[in-house]
Image (cartoon, rainbow, N blue to C red):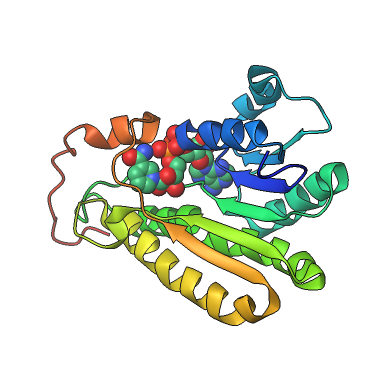
Amino acid sequence: MTFKDKVVAITGAAGGIGQSLCRLFLDEGAKIAAIDKKASLEGLAADLNADAKHFAHAVADISDPHEVERAFASLTGALGPIDILVNNAGGSAHRTLACTDPAGWRQNIEGNLDSAYYCARAVIPGMLARRSGVIINIGSVNGLSALGDPAYSAAKAAMISLTRSLAQEYGPYGVRANIVLPGTVRTPLARSTARPPPPCLWRRGAT
Ligand SMILES: NC(=O)c1ccc[n+]([C@@H]2O[C@H](COP(=O)([O-])OP(=O)(O)OC[C@H]3O[C@@H](n4cnc5c(N)ncnc54)[C@H](O)[C@@H]3O)[C@@H](O)[C@H]2O)c1
């Protein structure tokens, strides 16, 4: 019961790692504020056998700052202020630079990096007021090495810098920020990126 009654916001809660995080924190006594863009999030409380005192959810696309504001307003209304934010949502759909067009590049940066910034921005004022809070970003080994998925990797590399800035700026006020860089974890995301990339080639004049 290390986290008894702590309110833990978990983004990407309907995904592989997200569901495991929900289970782990629930087992440790926390209250879960779950966010995901997938409608399947609606069934997660029942899957986890969690009651309304310990679990609230918001279906939202967190690459949209307005949706982030709406989601956190509803979740804090249900469970109280957020003690811990786990920025876990993310993914990649562009395996090589040749397969990445400007829209795809933006999608990766918005979905993996901007979304984490928006969620941090939503919880920091409350954490500062209480002089207490934790932000955990889920990065990737892709942020350190050239492992393919270049737009995703650039976003994950930038998350390391974002984490340092959060820690530097808000650490003195009791708000800690850390990043975890997982290698391969067998989830739907890992299975989709394990397939060979499509044979995209640079084309003259391609966008
Ligand atoms: N699985 C791995 O091998 C691996 C390795 C390194 C890092 N990671 C990171 O771990 C995190 C979780 O990955 P996973 O393997 O559980 O993937 P997953 O695809 O199973 O889950 C990701 C979840 O995030 C949600 N999501 C994505 N973009 C969103 C958005 N804009 N708004 C709301 N929800 C959004 C998806 O709907 C999905 O449910 C990701 O940040 C990923 O980059 C995973």
The picture places residue 205, in percent across and down from the top left corner, at 19, 62
Percent of width and height locating residue 177: 55, 66
Residue positioned 16% across, 35% down in the render: 196
In the depicted structure, whether residue 13 falls above or below residue 104: above
Residue under the point 66% across and 33% down = 26
The quarter holding residue 33 reads top right
Q: Which residue sits at x=29%, y=54%?
A: 141
Q: Is 146 located above or below residue 185 in the figure?
A: below
> Residue 127 occupies which quadrant of the picture?
bottom right
Furthest residue toward front? 1
Please state, as top left, top right, bottom left or bottom right, where the C terminus lies in the image: bottom left
Q: Quadrant of the N terminus?
A: top right
Q: Position of residue 23 (x, y in %)?
A: 59, 30
Q: Residue furthest right?
A: 77
The answer to whether any part of residue 92 appears in the image is no
Residue sitting at x 60%, y 39%: 36
The answer to which image quadrant residue 13 occupies is: top right
